[in-house]
Amino acid sequence: MYVMFHSLLEELNLVVFSDLQKDKVFHAFCKLLRHTQCDGAYKNTIYWMTIQEKYNAFVKLLYQAHTDNWTEYLKNLILSMETPCIWYVSQGLPIPEMIEKSARQELQVLSKLIEISSKRIKERLDKSLFVPDWSAEKIDLEKLYFERLENIGKYGFGVWSKYHMFRMKLSDDAENGYILKPVAHPDAISLEMLTGYELQRQQVVDNTKALLKDLPASNILLYGSAGTGKSATVKAVANAFAGEGLRLIELSKNELHLLPELLEELSGNPLKFVIFVDDLSFQDNDDNFSALKAVLEGSVSARSHNVVIYATSNRRHIVRETFSQRAGDEIHRNDTMQETISLSERFGIQLLFDKPNKFLYLDIVSALAEQCNLQISAEELAMEAEKFATRKGGRSARTARQLIDQLQAKQCMKE
């Protein structure tokens, strides 16, 4: 067995997967294997201390990665790496023969490393000491990796394979002026949790399905009263289709001037993207207005085949008209109004989320109460809902959610 460990490390000449060596857990595992190679003649106190130290260092790092399964950890690391193979496949090009051969050879050796469990290492340790364990199993990394490459448009690669929601952040240090920061804990809202506005929501779902199937898809403006579920609809759709290759990138309205650079970056990516702009509105002479308008009308570059823009706004005409504009000459005022209207019209689909009437509001409250298993009569719930809406200044899906959260908290405290 010890000779086998030694030969494995000699075989492990990483080129395609060389970035594995930068991973602390993988590096610690290799160091542990190296220190299990001396024969029995050299087993002394220093030997035991050294191998125990390397063993504990590896297990600590593995546990800190929130797993005790070495196989699962290394598999996920390999499948999410950006490699030359990934680049060729994402560009729709065949992998050169020599690169593919090297990748397959490396994966064959890694398949042997990935199945080494703590039991096989502990045979070299002082049996009088307690040592923690990790699990491992046998898998064919070569087969798994190349199957993943065939479905790269569904699973993605690199950071895109680990997360499905991102936020743009301005950065002077980045080449393009921004970084895309993964959202580690996104809103877990689902389509099933939303009530009301079914027709509007279905149009967003259908448009997103068209995007995923490489069919013509439109940019969408979701507009209407605050708290009606416009943003929740977009996030729920992103959650629903994350497993089919959809990723959401949220931009603030002050970052829209970077849209051309972002579209260029995403153009060669096999995944599909929703660029999400929440609470969209502009003041006059805003550079971000011009950037969005140029992208929507396609004057910056060819229409992106894998990107749509979903924006929400409390108003359909998303450029705020100032008093000075209203007081200006009629020709200028008409030109300004036409330009602001034309921006809204450049969204292929415009969906109105109007303030709910009493019946829709109570339907939403009732559905949310059922989801939370609230123990309350329909009559009492309706009365509480109306009183709460009066205090909050009006009915909305957000108001309904806030009411149910409060009622659920009270119920839990009584139990």
Image (cartoon, rainbow, N blue to C red):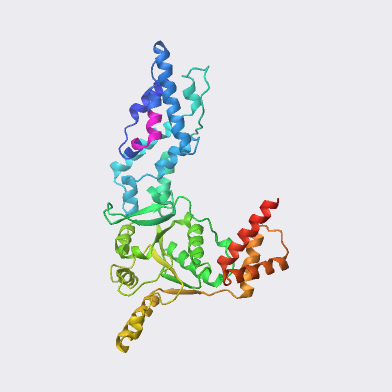
Is 409 inside the magenta-drawn segment? no
Q: Looking at the image, can residue 39 be seen?
A: no
Residue, far bottom = 330
Is 373 or 172 nearer to us in this picture? 172
Relative to 69, residue 148 above or below: below
Residue, far top = 41
- Whole-percent x, y for residue 277 in the image: 41, 65
> In the rendered image, which quarter is residue 268 located in?
bottom left
Relative to 10, residue 82 above or below: below
Residue found at x 51% / y 28%: 133
- Whole-percent x, y for residue 408 in the image: 64, 57
Q: Is residue 94 left or right of residue 380?
A: left
- Whole-percent x, y for residue 365 in the image: 63, 66
Q: Is residue 391 left or right of residue 88?
A: right
Residue found at x 42% / y 18%: 49
Q: Please, what is the dominant secondary structure of the magenta stretch? A: helix
The part of the chain drawn in magenta is 21-30
Relative to 338, residue 275 above or below: above
> In the rendered image, which quarter is residue 348 located in?
bottom left
Q: In which quarter of the image is the N terminus?
A: top left
Is 22 inside the magenta-drawn segment? yes
**Total count of labels:** 0
Residue found at x 34% / y 65%: 256
